[in-house]
Image: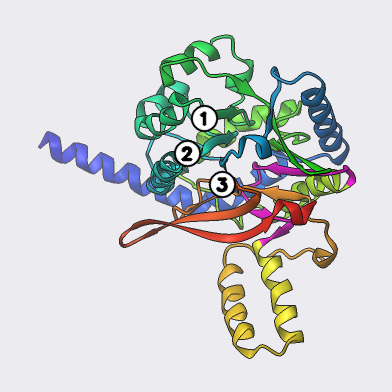
Amino acid sequence: MRSGKICSIAFFKMGIRKLLQRILTKPVLKLANKYSSKPDKQRVHEALSKLYQHIQKKPGKKGLIINIERAHQKIIIFSDLHKGNKKRSDDFAPAEQNYLAALDYYNREGYTLIMLGDSEELWKFNLFTVQKHNHPSFDAEKKFLNRNALIKVFGNHDIFWNNDPFAGAQLLATYGQKVKIFEGVLLQHRKERKSIDILLTHGHQGDGQSDGNKFSAWFVAKVWAPLQSYLELNINTPAFNDILKTEHNQFMYEWSSQQENLLLVTGHTHQPVFESMTHLERLYKLLLIARQQNDTQAIAKLQEEIAFRRQEYDHVSEDYLHLKPTYFNTGCCCFSDGDITGIEIDNGAIRLIKWKKEDSGSKRSVLEKTSINTLL
């Protein structure tokens, strides 16, 4: 009798939650869009310039400088895992299998792993919960650390690693050894008389939610995070809040295009960008070329791919054909379908890659690639 009563209560609570999901999801997302994050162009540009100059003048504290041409380093950059509690409101849970498969591959191949911020979701969940439910991914990352091939950059959702007095002790407890935290990394590529810098940072600079907006910080901590957790919402799809993402990406692009011999790589927006264009924009560019060449087979294939990609994100910049190839975005490791995206830098090439679940396991595919020398 008692167990039947408990089951009835549990079903009643589930029914209430589903009802509230139906009623509150849209207004909560609209409210979150309005207050949670508002990038400011001037703040974005000033913060990026300050970080770039600081790493150049005083490497080591805020960021590392790595000469990738001399060391012939192979690098994989992932961002925005948002590791949580493995329940429905955990954005990372669907992608964990692909992430572990990817780390296994990159560790075997001798890559350096750069975690570009928001690796842990410390707005919705406390650190001890994240540590408890993510042993497999922490253990996989530890393999890179054991061979001195792990670099950890903080983002806005895991800024704890940068500003909490106990962060060092918690990193030691998590990884079994000391881990330094940086705001950015500067990769330097030298080829004969030519050179180019690649600045890596999370990309939350100038974000109203992460850069001094007290109301937004209160909204996230007291309203948005508890509601998202209770309603079991996973909002991390490429189409979520696309206008805001694109605006922030635009500010990042504008800053990078004004610098001399510099590429910028960020995360934060969860929207993959390669050579300053989203994947969809690059497909449209290829379609224009195919039409000019009257390549009917390529036209049909590209139209099919564009129709598919528009389900993920459909924003196309008006001037996408005239953008300088200076800005790149890793995308994220928490898409709701379990896919993850990242950026590889290897032997003079830079690639946007995706890991996707298939019947035989997880498969890596190259979405975009180019030579750094071409960018030079």
Name the amino acid, label 3. Cys
Mark 3 surroundings: few (<14), some (14-19) or many (≥20) residues within 10 A? many
Any mark on residue 332, and which?
3
Mark nearest the camera among 2 and 1 is 2
Percent of width and height locating residue 22 = 48, 54
Name the amino acid, label 2. Gly
47 displayed left or right of 132: right
Labelled pair 2, 1 in contact (Cβ < 8 Å): yes
Percent of width and height locating residue 322 = 85, 64
Residue found 67% across the figure and 58% down from its top: 370
97 displayed left or right of 240: left
The residue beneath circle 1 is 149
Please tell me which residue lies in front, 71 or 197.
71
Please tell me which residue lies in front, 23 or 83.
83
Image quadrant where one finds the N terminus: top left
The residue beneath circle 2 is 110
**Is 262 in the magenta?**
yes
2 displayed left or right of 316: left
Quick one: label 2 or label 1, which is nearer the N terminus? 2
Mark nearest the camera among 3 and 1 is 1
Q: Is residue 69 above or below residue 371?
A: above
Quarter holding residue 204 = top right
Any mark on residue 11, and which?
none
| Disc 2 to disc 3, C-alpha distance | 22 Å
Percent of width and height locating residue 162 = 63, 19
Name the amino acid, label 1. Ala
Q: What secondary structure is marked by label 3?
A: loop
| Residue span colored magenta | 258-278
